[in-house]
Structures are given as C-alpha cells and as structure tokens.
Amino acid sequence: MFPSLSAILCLSLLLPALHCNNNLLCYYSPIMYRNKTFDLILTECPPAELCMTGNGRYGNHSALSTRGCMASTGCGQIHPLPLKGTVYTMTYACCGYNYCNAGRRVAVNSVPLVAAMTMLLLTGL
C-alpha cells in the first residue's frame, strides 16, 4: 500500500518539472580555448532562444568553443571576436530540443530513466 502511494507522490512531484516548462534546457560553457576543460552547466534558455554551440577559428585552426543559448537570429552567423590580441572568427550553430548542445563529452539527460527506476524500486517490481 505505502510503496504505491510513495510512487504516486514521487510521480506527481516529478512530472510537472518535466513537462510544464516550454523553455529549452541547454548546456552552458563560456568562450574558452579548445584545449581547456570545463564542467558544463545546465541552463534554461529564455523564451524564444535556442541551444547553441560556437566554434572560434584562427585561420584553419579551431581554437575556441562555447555553448549556451542564443536568439535564432544569431544562428548560422559569423562574427569576429577579439580576444587577448587575436581576432577569431566565431560561427554559431543552433538546435531546438533539450540538451541538444551536449556534444560527445556529456551524457544525455537521465531524468526520465532515474524517475522510472525510482518508480520500480518504490513499487517493489
């Protein structure tokens, strides 16, 4: 009896957080040199913004990277970026679903899997 009640309570608390928000969830990292590492931060984009990955080039060398949110008007754009005496060419690519700018270093969202496993454990299956 109580495991079922616990499962229902858990589900009722978890589902609104997963489905009531229309803003995209994306990963953020500041503009940084490619050979540096940074633990990506999960962020919620403002309304009408998309997830973005940015690539900064110096000549033929890919030197900078960034992730975050961006207005759709900036997607696909190329901008010069002066940084520490060097002008890099930044290009931005956008995508429109949760966690789509994760890249290969970050695992995809595991919240639905954790919720399902919690439900199974609470119901004793």
Image: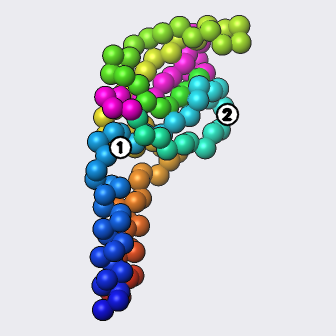
Residue 36 marker: 2
The amino acid beneath tag 1 is: Asn
Left or right: 103 with respect to 120?
right
Farthest residue to the right: give it: 84
Residue 42 location in percent, x, y? Answer: 49, 44
Secondary structure mostly seen in magenta is: strand
Front residue of 6/94: it is 6
Residue 75 location in percent, x, y? Answer: 36, 20
Q: Whole-Å distance between the Cαs marked 2 and 1?
A: 25 Å
Residue 83 location in percent, x, y? Answer: 66, 13
Left or right: 82 with respect to 79?
right
Front disc: 2 or 1: 1
Question: Is label 2 in a helix, a strand or a loop?
Answer: loop
The answer to whether mark 2 and mark 1 are in CB contact below 8 A is no
Q: How many marks?
A: 2
Residue that appears at 35% across and 39% down: 24
Residue 58 marker: none
Residue 49 in the magenta stretch? The answer is yes
For the question of whether residue 33 can be seen, the reply is yes
Local packing at callout 2 (Cα closer than 10 Å; few below 14, some 14-19, many 20+) is few
Residue that appears at 32% across and 69% down: 11
Quadrant of the rendered structure where residue 16 is? bottom left
The magenta segment is 46-63
Mark 2 / mark 1, whichever is N-terminal: 2
Question: Is label 1 in a helix, a strand or a loop?
Answer: loop
Front residue of 25/101: it is 25
Figure quadrant of the N terminus: bottom left
The amino acid beneath tag 2 is: Lys
Q: Where is 84 relative to 94, above or below? A: above
Front residue of 103/49: it is 49
Residue 53 location in percent, x, y? Answer: 45, 29
User: According to the image, label 1 marks what residue?
Assistant: 98
